[in-house]
Image (cartoon, grey):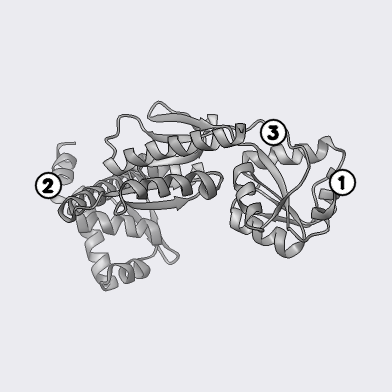
Amino acid sequence: MAHLDRVFRSNLKLRHLQLVVALDEFRHLGRTAEFMAVSQPAVSRMLSEVEAMLGFALFERSVRGTEPTPAGVAVVRFARGVLAQYERTRDEIDAAASGAAGKTRVGSMAVAMPVLMARAVEALKARSARAAVQIEEGDLTHLLPKLRLGELDLFVGRLEPGYAAPDLQTETLYEEPMVVVAGPRSAVAAMAAPAWADLAAVPCVMPPPWASLRVKLEQQFHRHGVQPSADLMETSSYLATLTFVGSRGGVGFLARSAARSFEGQGLCKILDVPLPLHLPPVGIITQRGAALPASSLQLIDCLREAAAAGAAETAG
């Protein structure tokens, strides 16, 4: 244990950590060498140096590439956390030196992107035009690990109860129902009040099979005595949903606030189809006790204001 303490505190350098993370990303010595702008033998030597310092193997090598060992998984997680903190500190120092307002790193689900995030970022820029906002779109399974490693400052999206944990702090912003949408010039969009049988008769864009929303939507079809369309596309992307309902004359499912925004731009039509789903609220997740950059704290304030304004519009 004392040996490992000495290695982690004194011997490991930033370049070693970058190597470990790159190998985990690419799982291939050659592609890692290309990414780091060094030769493949140099990558092999550097990896051997790190493993010799630690006293155990980090990656299994084979003709198929590299795979982290159980100990390697732990070191990769450590390396990602250190590099994330390094990047955050570097950005804060650069911001202080240049007079900018710093950078905030946000993980956002599609449900929050078109309206909530757009309004919050606009408000943040009105406060400080030089504040930088880095947004990564994805789902909880993809974004929460990055939040825990410090690669993201906050997450914005649906607060799925299954992901609640003592190390995470959540804040509910608002409830966000779903609606059914179609291409604005499709046959189903011309119907005054489409039935679920009409939805099942056209191409359908659904969330991926692993999404909790997928099961709830399939149940809605079954409750109305029909099966979902056999002509199915699967995506969690709102852009892909709009693309396919528009190009194929099908239907899809979007958060109401996003759908209203897209409908106002002529990109879809909201159908008069009741969709009573019990869904988690939209909110914010941060690491409990984390010291957030000033720009992230400002963005959280802007998110609260944007959510309150949206709720007032809905009520009105």
For this rendering, which residue is in front, 50 or 315?
A: 315
Q: Secondary structure at mark 1?
A: helix
Residue 151 seen in render: no
Q: Find disc 1 in the rendering and name its residue.
A: 197
Nearer the observer, disc 3 or disc 2? 3
Residue 86 seen in render: yes
| Between discs 3 and 1, the one toward the N terminus | 1
- The picture places residue 65, in percent across and down from the top left corner, at 41, 63
Q: Find disc 2 in the rendering and name its residue.
A: 10
Label at residue 277: 3
For this rendering, which residue is in front, 295 or 51?
A: 295
Q: Secondary structure at mark 3?
A: loop
* Circles 3 and 2 in contact, beta carbons < 8 Å: no
- The picture places residue 216, in percent across and down from the top left corner, at 70, 37
Which amino acid type corresponds to the residue marked 3 in the rendered image? Answer: Leu
Residue ID at (60%, 50%): 261
Label at residue 257: none
Relative placement, left or right, of 157 versus 59 is right
Nearer the observer, disc 2 or disc 1? 1
Which amino acid type corresponds to the residue marked 2 in the rendered image? Answer: Ser
Image quadrant assignment for residue 25: bottom left
